[in-house]
Image (cartoon, rainbow, N blue to C red):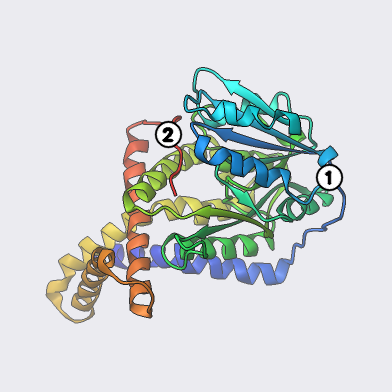
Amino acid sequence: MDAILFLSLLLVLYAYLGYPAAVACLAGLLRREVRKGESEPAVSVVIAAYNEAPVIAATIENKLALDYPGGKLEIVVVSDGSSDGTDAVVEGFAARGVRLIRQEPRAGKTSALNLALASVTGEIVVFSDANSLYAPDALRALVANFADPQVGYVTGRMVYLGKDGKPAGEGCGAYMRYENRLRLLETGIGSVVGVDGGIDAVRRSLYRPMAPDQLPDFVLPLMVVDQGYRVVYEQQALLFEQALVEDADEYRMRVRVSLRALWAMFAMRRLLNPLRFPLFAWQLFSHKVLRYLVFLFLVLAYLSSAIKSGAGGWYLALFLAQNLFYLAATAARFAGEGGLVSRLLIFSRYFCLVNLAAGHAFLKFLMGKKQVLWQPRKG
């Protein structure tokens, strides 16, 4: 029982702290910089949309206003069987060069991207969500990385905004800052493992059609690595999105993303072969496989410490500490805004939400369930 308890705690600590620390050390040794340049290749921005009439106009205006030569910028919106007037809104931008492609019947985001990539003309393809707003220089920041011939895929930095329009400080905001810091470190050793689907760019020559149930934000970068190119993080390419307000919405989104990521890792499991990909296999296993299994380690740690708590001492202290942590996560709903205690409560709640969603997704994965269609993300 001691072995289960110690190993479970060790794996949780390694997944969230040990792996980032190891990457930071390697980044200091390897120093794999990206050789950026000032070129202006032709770029196609692809936006997949399903019933996004309330936000699609603002998103298109945002892309048209980007600091990039208009003659080298193509904007394509794929309407995935929308029925709320999204198509009419997009068609209103036709005179300004925005092209609408309708996918009928509805088949999901991945199929929409496959359809668009068959006709886009840009050397570089940028993927935007229907509610993603870029900083004016975001496109230039992304594209600069492709001056390095070893770079095949670039992901930007997502900033979640609260109701007041300011960056969200707790919960998902803190989690994204943690992930972005890790991506910066991973770039320093070669390639990042996870990306943000709302602000990603790929060389069109490296795009490979994906199955409808595959998560493009995860599978496509892995395909690029499989082809021998780097996937890097550009912290100056900013994307702004509204943070989800309700825990239920965030939970559903996390379950969906986790489930599709699990299937993606299963489909691309050859990248876990340390003989073929010695460094990236370790990264993929540590950053994703173990991270999605943290829920299991937490359960094992709790149960084993509960069994050993009768022995008193640090076993009892550890068991009580876990109970206090989960009680704090439950109480976070009633926490006020601001203050260190409130921030810690909200972070503990988000930590539990993410891992509970991962456990839910893992059960669905074991049952063979897949998800192709879903409702638009709500802010």
**Residue found 51% across the figure and 23% down from its top:** 81
Placement of 48 over or under 16, stated as above or below: above
Can you name the residue that lies furthest to the bottom here? 313
| Identity, as a three-letter code, of the amino acid under mark 1 | Pro
Can you name the residue that lies furthest to the top here? 105
Residue 252 in the image: x percent, y percent? Answer: 36, 44
- The residue that mark 1 highlights is 69
Which numbered mark, 1 or 2, is in the foreground of this view?
Answer: 1
> Are the residues tagged 1 and 2 within 8 Å (C-beta)?
no
- Secondary structure beneath disc 1? loop
**Residue found 74% across the figure and 29% down from its top:** 95
Residue 87 in the image: x percent, y percent? Answer: 57, 26
Residue 340 in the image: x percent, y percent? Answer: 38, 79
Q: Which mark is residue 338?
A: none
Report the Cα–Cα distance between label 1 and label 2: 35 Å
| Identity, as a three-letter code, of the amino acid under mark 2 | Trp
Q: Quadrant of residue 12?
A: bottom left
Placement of 199 over or under 8, stated as above or below: above
- The residue that mark 2 highlights is 374
Q: Quadrant of the N terminus?
A: bottom left
Q: Earlier in the sequence, mark 1 or mark 2?
A: 1
Q: Nearer the viewer, residue 208 or 189?
A: 208
**Residue found 42% across the figure and 68% down from its top:** 13
Can you name the residue that lies furthest to the left here? 310
Q: Nearer the viewer, residue 366 or 155?
A: 155
Q: How many marks?
A: 2
Query: Within 10 Å of the Cα at label 2, are there few (<14), some (14-19), or many (20+) other Cα atoms?
Result: few
Residue 208 in the image: x percent, y percent? Answer: 67, 30
Relative placement, left or right, of 270 versus 17 is right
Q: Nearer the viewer, residue 233 or 135?
A: 135
Residue 70: in sight, yes or no? yes
